[in-house]
Amino acid sequence: MTITSRIDRRFSDLKAEGRGALVTFITAGDPNLDISFEILKSLPKNGADVIELGMPFSDPMADGPAIQLASERALAGGQTMAKTLDMVRRFREDDDDTPLVLMGYYNPIYHYGPEQFVKDAKTAGVDGLIVVDVPPEADEELCLPAIQAGLNFIRLATPTTDDERLPKVLENTSGFLYYVSVTGITGVNAPDIADVLQNVARIKTKTSLPVAVGFGVKSAEQVRAIVSGTDEIAGADAVVVGSAIVRTIEENLDEQGQPKSELVETVNKLISELASGIRT
């Protein structure tokens, strides 16, 4: 089933502008529901082109300490899947253009009920899903129902995804392909830009999908280098920043774990700085 989503339109528009996309990640409910929603609403105004909203989970095995702690804070504050979907619903009341992707793990979706989850996600205004622990071999479980409902299903490729494995990864992927720039967990190691660009170029010979690069990107300089490329190698279509944002939230909590008054402003400043790497 072929769909044209907000994600497709956004990447098409940015290609016409001649620039890449900044994809920002936050965990729903971190550090609490109200502040999390305030940050979510402010992301597009400060330069986010696509939003990834993390679905809190107690065992986020692909994520580093920063996002693990964010999930713990959100769950301790009572965040649920229903509240996460309601965040999306409220976000859509004022923003019908910015693509929003739910990212996380299958366990919370399974407990919610996959069929009901797909239906409710679409109704709330979700555009796509990234579910890191559902492989292509299990597409019938979630991927195909999501596509049939009109959601993009975004798959991850890694430095170890060779040319033999890549076609399977791409088989039912839509919206964009998320290239994990480093092996291991999120937010720990910095990407080797030269290696990243070579792998992005390799992937682009196999697909017309936009390629977004994430894991370990922390600065406007890294963002600029990844989307700009070199004279010999074209850059990526997008850069994903997550751990740096989540870590900024953590750094702006007081000793009792409560948000400081400047938290949202500090996060907005970081987003604007990252966006400058895309827009210059």
Image: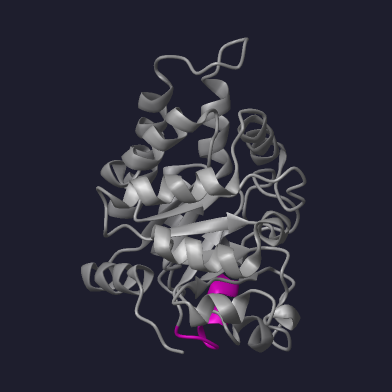
Q: Quadrant of residue 97?
A: bottom left
**Residue 25: % across, % down:** 50, 48
- Which is more toward the observer, 197 or 163? 163
Q: Quadrant of residue 106?
A: bottom right
Asked if residue 203 lies left or right of residue 220, the reply is right
Q: Main secondary structure of the magenta part?
A: helix
**Which residue of the protein is positioned furthest toward the left in this rendering?**
17
Asked if residue 268 lies left or right of residue 142, the reply is left
Q: Is residue 157 shown above or below 74? A: below
Residue at figure coordinates x 64%, y 30% from the top left = 73
**Residue 195: % across, % down:** 62, 66
Q: Which residues are magenta?
A: 197-208
Q: Is residue 203 in the magenta section?
A: yes
Q: Is residue 106 shown above or below 248? A: below
Q: Is residue 195 in the magenta section?
A: no
- Which is more toward the observer, 95 or 280? 95
Q: Please say whether residue 280 is visible from this viewpoint.
A: no
Q: Is residue 53 shown above or below 11? A: above
Residue at figure coordinates x 27%, y 49% from the top left = 93
